[in-house]
Amino acid sequence: MSTLTGTMHLARLNVRRDRVRLAVWLAALTGLLAATTAGIKSLYPTAADLAGYAETAGSSPAATALNGPGHAVDTAGGATVFEVGGYLSVAVALMSVLIIGRCTRAEEESGRLELLRANVLGRHAALAAAVIVMVAMNIAVGTAVAAIMTAFDVSAAGAATFGAALAGIGIVFGAVAAVTSQITEHVRGSNAIAGTVVAAAYVIRAAGDVGETGLSWLSPFGWVQATRPFADERWWPLLIALGAAALLVAMAVALQNRRDVGAGLVPQRPGPASASPTLLHQVGFSLRLQRASLIGWTVGVFLGGLAFGSVAREMEDIVAESDDLQEWVSAYGANPTEAFLALTLLLLSLAAAGCAIASALRITSEESAGRAEPILATPLSRPAWLLSHLVAPLAAAIVVPVAGGLGTGIAYGILTSDAEQIPRLAGAAMAHVPAVWLLTAATVLLIGLLPRLAVTAWAILAGCVVAAMLGSLIRLPDWVLELSPFEHTPRLPGGSMDVAASLTLTGLAAAVIVVGVVSFRRRDVR
């Protein structure tokens, strides 16, 4: 038996088990690209419109830090890459990190991999199978991206280059996750380390692009953007990415040879001799379990607010170049700057909804891992256990948007020398909290009624993102847009507060949570 025995069987099992997650990732990424491409062609239908856009957005240092350097921004394909390429790159990187973590460290942590290893399964089969699935998924995303952009009548060579660049960045950070999964004993720690590497690489790329110092060549994001899609396409930077990925995978294999199954290279620290009083209560215990992830989400959204707030003053010049863009922005406010701030707070609240959904889905993780059943065998009731785990996502629905509003307010307040913008924008972010609560409630309902399909809560969030960002650009019907709870929240700052709508969303969220809790009480524990 070799160290790779059973690799393909395990790869097929991973695809079969995660087919819904993989399909959601593919649909979300390609859907966002398709909607953005359609929006760019609608907002800038002529060469003159694209030239005006390139003169304003492409020359902005803040936009360069956020999106990367603009290559061929005066073309529809180049403008699309400039607008959404940075976000798609980060999303593909995180997708690869999560795939590797789930197929390797999560299987070890649950004990399932040890049972498989007791049979005919090679030592490196699980890692190899995870890498195969990750690479195949990135190739699928890259191919779909190239096909979709070509269908919108842009340069086929540029579309193929951009698709290959996205696949390359995903493979690199998937290889990074293969290394980090050898370090810690828990999948949360592995994913956190890999996510930190993604964030550091993005910051290094931003600093290098703004300063034009060549620092971006130290970042995988800099390698793939050097392919220059829709400009003078270059394929050789992808060789750097693939070479780095190969070296990282070889490092992961070497590190795996130096540790036991289920263990990490860094030994787990012993806990304190006595437990904190907060851990003696179920609510405190559930909050402790999610403390690290909630802090990470809060810091990330805060930094996102700083980034968006730093470009707010430039929106007036950008919007002035396009009548269609003025029409789109006017949905968020009459003043372009205020409208951009309102759109920023909406996007940050959508990110907060992602945090709340991830936190609520921790319930299914506890249940499927077998940790819920022994707790429920105690006098603790099912509703009490479920509600104790809902404290974290419901609190995150408040804390995370406010953190984003604070970040936006600090950056914009520094630009305008107006400290009052900080409490103003932090308060405006609270307007979207009822919508985040409603998405959290929908997740609870899925957990109670259809626990195996609870992951489709991410698809609901993806629909809300498309409706918020691109619904009007791609001419979605009004009834489709109104399915998103964020369409019923006030557009602050600049708009007026609708107390009735906020109370309605809050009441609906409470009712849905009650139905979810009752359904959970009546079904079997998985």
Image: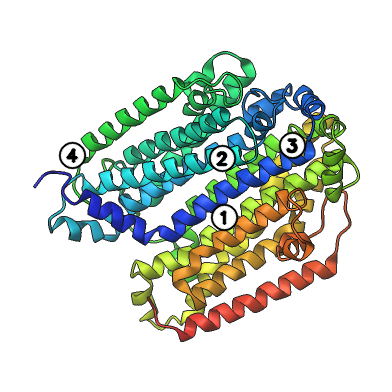
Q: Secondary structure at mark 1?
A: helix
Numbered badge on residue 88: 2
Q: Earlier in the sequence, mark 2 or mark 3?
A: 2
Query: Mark 4: few, some, or many residues within 10 Å (few <14, many ≥20)?
Result: few
Query: Quadrant where the C terminus lies?
Result: bottom left
Q: CA distance from mark 2 to mark 3?
A: 21 Å
> Which residue is pictured at 81% across the width and 31% down the height?
318
Q: CA distance from mark 3 to mark 1?
A: 21 Å
Query: Mark 3: few, some, or many residues within 10 Å (few <14, many ≥20)?
Result: many
Numbered badge on residue 395: none
Q: Position of residue 231 (x, y in %)?
A: 61, 21
> Which residue is pictured at 69% across the width and 48% down the height?
347
Query: Mark 1: few, some, or many residues within 10 Å (few <14, many ≥20)?
Result: many
> Which residue is pictured at 64% across the width and 58% down the height?
463
Q: CA distance from mark 2 to mark 4?
A: 34 Å
Q: Secondary structure at mark 3?
A: helix
Q: Nearer the viewer, mark 1 or mark 2?
A: 2
Q: Secondary structure at mark 4?
A: loop
Q: Nearer the viewer, mark 2 or mark 4?
A: 2
Q: Earlier in the sequence, mark 3 or mark 4?
A: 4
Q: Earlier in the sequence, mark 4 or mark 1?
A: 4
Numbered badge on residue 257: 4
User: Closest to the observer: 327 or 525?
Assistant: 327
Residue where numbered disc 3 is placed? 309
Residue where numbered disc 1 is placed? 355
In the picture provided, is 168 more to the left or to the right than 114? right
- Are the residues tagged 2 and 3 within 8 Å (C-beta)? no
For residue 205, above or below residue 280:
above
